[in-house]
């Protein structure tokens, strides 16, 4: 059940992520980024929001440098036949990648990078809670095994599937041009850690 849920969730997530850029122009993602930045500045402070935006721009630049698609400025100087071939290839790349869909993907990745930067900003402070929840779940599981108490595999499957769905929903929320509360993104590790800790409690353990 858990494997089927994971595969179905990932396939649905892939389809939705590829559909979103076709449904919204790049300007919509840029406008949403401005809104999220303003909300973060009001909630977390100007310095924190500036660090998040700087990290997002850095991730975007790193992804652009790692892209296999060549740009016109990267082309080597040539003459004659080589120059004609180079111009034709540059024209093909321009028509293929410089269209509204790929521009929307670029803007979508920038918005997702900003939200990821918001998560990374507070992740070191939040990791203690998921770790504590999972350790607590393991200790409860150990006590159940020693006392020969019943482990519920259905509840384990339920909470594991909820953790998978929460992770997929988080990724989808990162790319949707909807306004997220600045506190919603940092709460994701807490929710997933709590679900995983609860799932561990009912994972079967032999005494």
Image (tube, grey):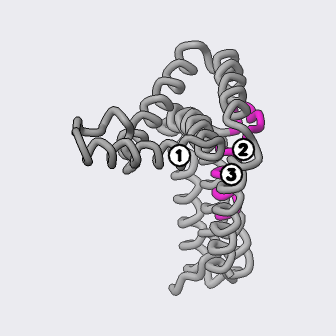
**Residue neighbourhood size for the residue with mark 3, other residues' Cα within 10 Å, grouped as few (<14), some (14–19), many (≥20):** some
Q: Residue 71 or 106: which is nearer the viewer?
A: 71
**Tag 3's secondary structure?**
helix
Can residue 163 be seen in the rendering of this structure?
A: no
Query: Which residue shows up at 63% across the image and 67% down it?
Result: 10
Residue indicated by mark 2: 176
Q: Alpha-carbon distance for marks 2 and 3?
A: 6 Å
Q: Quadrant of residue 14?
A: bottom right
Q: Residue at x 74, y 35 (%)?
A: 180
Is residue 36 inside the magenta stretch?
no
Question: Residue 13: x percent and y percent?
Answer: 67, 61
List x then y, in percent, for residue 127.
51, 44
Query: Is 76 or 151 nearer to us in this picture?
Result: 76
Q: In the rendered view, does 12 fall on the left or right side of 3?
A: right
Q: Furthest-front residue in view?
A: 80
Q: Which tag, 1 or 3, sits closer to the chain's start?
A: 1
CA distance for labels 1 and 3 = 23 Å
Marks 1, 3: nearer the viewer: 1
Q: Report, in whole angstroms, how far the alpha carbon at label 2 lies from the one at label 1.
A: 21 Å
Residue under label 3, please give it.
172
Please say if the residues under marks 1 and 3 sit with CB atoms less than 8 Å apart.
no
State if disc 3 and disc 2 touch (CB < 8 Å): yes
| Rendered position, 173 above or below 107 | below
Number of other residues with Cα within 10 Å of mark 1, as a class: few under 14, some 14 to 19, many 20 or more: few
Residue 23, placed above or below residue 154: above
For the record, the magenta segment spans 164-184
In the image, 176 versus 150, the foreground residue is: 176
Q: Which mark identifies residue 97?
A: 1
């Amino acid at each position: 059940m858990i494997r089927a849920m994971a595969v179905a969730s990932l396939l649905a997530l892939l389809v939705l992520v590829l559909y979103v850029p076709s449904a919204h122009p790049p300007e919509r993602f840029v406008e949403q980024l401005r809104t999220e930045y303003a909300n973060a500045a009001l909630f977390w402070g100007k310095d924190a929001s500036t660090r998040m935006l700087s990290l997002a721009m850095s991730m975007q630049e790193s992804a652009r440098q790692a892209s296999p698609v060549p740009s016109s400025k990267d082309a080597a100087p040539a003459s004659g036949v080589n120059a004609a071939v180079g111009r034709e290839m540059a024209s093909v790349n321009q028509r293929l990648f410089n269209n509204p869909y790929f521009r929307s993907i670029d803007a979508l990745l920038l918005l997702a990078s900003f939200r990821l930067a918001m998560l990374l900003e507070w992740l070191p402070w939040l990791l203690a809670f998921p770790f504590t929840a999972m350790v607590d779940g393991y200790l409860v599981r150990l006590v159940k095994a020693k006392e020969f108490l019943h482990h519920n595999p259905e509840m384990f499957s339920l909470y594991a599937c909820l953790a998978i769905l929460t992770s997929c929903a988080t990724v989808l929320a990162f790319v949707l041009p909807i306004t997220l509360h600045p506190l919603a993104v940092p709460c994701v590790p807490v929710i997933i850690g709590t679900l995983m800790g609860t799932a561990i409690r009912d994972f079967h353990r032999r005494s």
